[in-house]
Image (cartoon, rainbow, N blue to C red):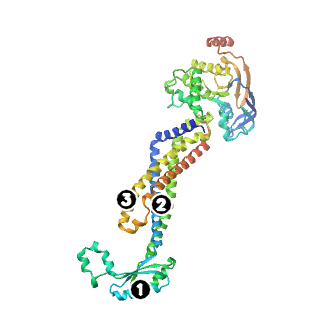
Amino acid sequence: MKFTSSRYLVKEGLKNIWNNRMMSLASIVVLVSCLIITGAAILLSANVNSLISTIGDDNQINIYLDYKMSDIDAIKLGPEIKKISNVDQCEFYSKDEGIKEFKDKIGNDIYQSMQGDDNPLGHVYKVRLKDLSEYESTINEIKKIDGVVSVSDRAAVARTLTKLNYFVTIAGFWLVLILGVVTLFIISNTIKMTMYSRRFEISIMKSVGATNTFVRIPFIIEAMSIGLIAGLFSSVVLICLYEPIRESAGSMLSMIASSTIPLGDIWLRVLLGFSGAGILIGALGGVISITKYLRREGGEILGW
Amino acid sequence: MIHLENITKIYPNGTEALKNISLDIKQGEFVFIVGPSGAGKSTFLKLLIREETANFGKITVNGYDLMKIKRQKIPYLRRTMGIVFQDFRLIDKMNVYDNIAFAMRAIGAHERDIKKRVRFVIDMVGLNGKEKCRPNELSGGEQQRVSLARALVNNPEMLIADEPTGNIDPKMSFDIMKKLVEINNRGTTIIVVTHEHELVKKFGGRVIIIKNGEIEVDQQLPTKYHPLKEIDNIDDNSEEAEQ
């Protein structure tokens, strides 16, 4: 296609958006909603995955001992724990060290009153495992040792997150599917309206020998532009909302702050991905409606 | 140029619009297609531009075999012809210049060529000074001249005029017919579909009368108008001929 033709066709396509501004706006709003919901589901899923993998990579578990247990008894448990074949490292973490961590939060007076036998915390062993696949059996073995009150079972958290991720993925898939169909429908209708309002021009174009491709291009450009505008807008919305949401979730649980994906790593991908998705959905909607129209009635010269 | 051999067209509802029609139209001919409503004139035109396909027979237009032509080749067939409609079919929101240029833009012509050619056809149909006017600012005759200019702008080998004088007054009709004859004298084949027998009598040329889907008359009448002759003479001549 010649450069002048391309320029003319692009101009016509963009002019169509303005001429049908209400329908174009409706399409953009629907497409933006669709992309934001889809994007939120994708970002949530990506972050949950990142969290799961962080937890999975972390092969350290905490063994909490009875708070009444004396220092000597607690230290004696060390070799017993080390005897378990899957235990790689075992580090004692006294209850004095534990209460020291809370000093700032509870204040000096309370801290001073919680020394020695008044310390409500128990001793802790921080254990690293050799093989994470034997996680469950190792935990069970540790729990059998006298004086062990509880073990931090991160596998349960991982399991919950995996379930959440599964739910997000399934729900996200259906959301994308349903909203995708709705969006396609809306975009096709916008293009159909444009074609209806320009059917007379299309008819004249066909009578003077315009090819179907030539007739089609402005409508496809119109649909793609609607998609691009919606893609850019929704990605900007998501980028603006992402960091505040991540920060507020991180303030609730420190693990989230450290394990989720920072905005710097994803903003470009979000921007490009959303713009691309918008253009693709737009092009698809445009192609479907114009092809259908040209096949059914667009080839005829009206009123003859 | 146009070759129809035993063409029959039956619509899906059973209407037999054309029955075993055969005719040839040569390059540079001026042909009137005459007949009452429902005679098959429109079907004949639709076959020529390949909007309809004949059920039987053989039809060749400007080198294209319309019984075998591929769908994607139809636009190229249509580029060899210009069409003038009875109701002008101008785009209201475009001015005269853009209405004419639209036909060139639709086939991807270069803007520089468009400017040159549009100016030329505007001059040819006598619409100088009206380039910026919208269709609703023009008389019926002027609108038809815009339609004629649009049909000519792609330099077609053949011009099809479907009732070109149907929506304009007799003086304007004469004016349009004069233009068509002038264009014909430059070598373009002209096919005029009309039911105005007076116009046919006044201008002469080849006359094909279609009735009930069949060619009833195919006759060459003497040509009574030449661009170099004055229009008033035609009226006199035709009156004499009638007497």
- Residue ID for mark 2: A42
| Chain under numbered label 2 | A
CA distance for labels 1 and 2? 45 Å
At label 2, the amino acid type is Ile
- Residue ID for mark 1: A78
Residue A204 left/right relative to A78: right
The numbered dot on residue A244 is 3
Question: Closer to the camera, A251 or A101?
Answer: A101
In front: mark 2 or mark 3? 3
First in sequence: mark 1 or mark 2?
2
- Name the quarter where the N terminus of chain A is drawn: top right
At label 3, the amino acid type is Pro
First in sequence: mark 1 or mark 3?
1
Query: Residue B52: where, in percent of width, then height?
Result: 67, 37
| Residue B58 vertical position relative to residue A64 in the rendered view, above or below | above
| Residue A157 vertical position relative to residue B68 in the rendered view, above or below | below
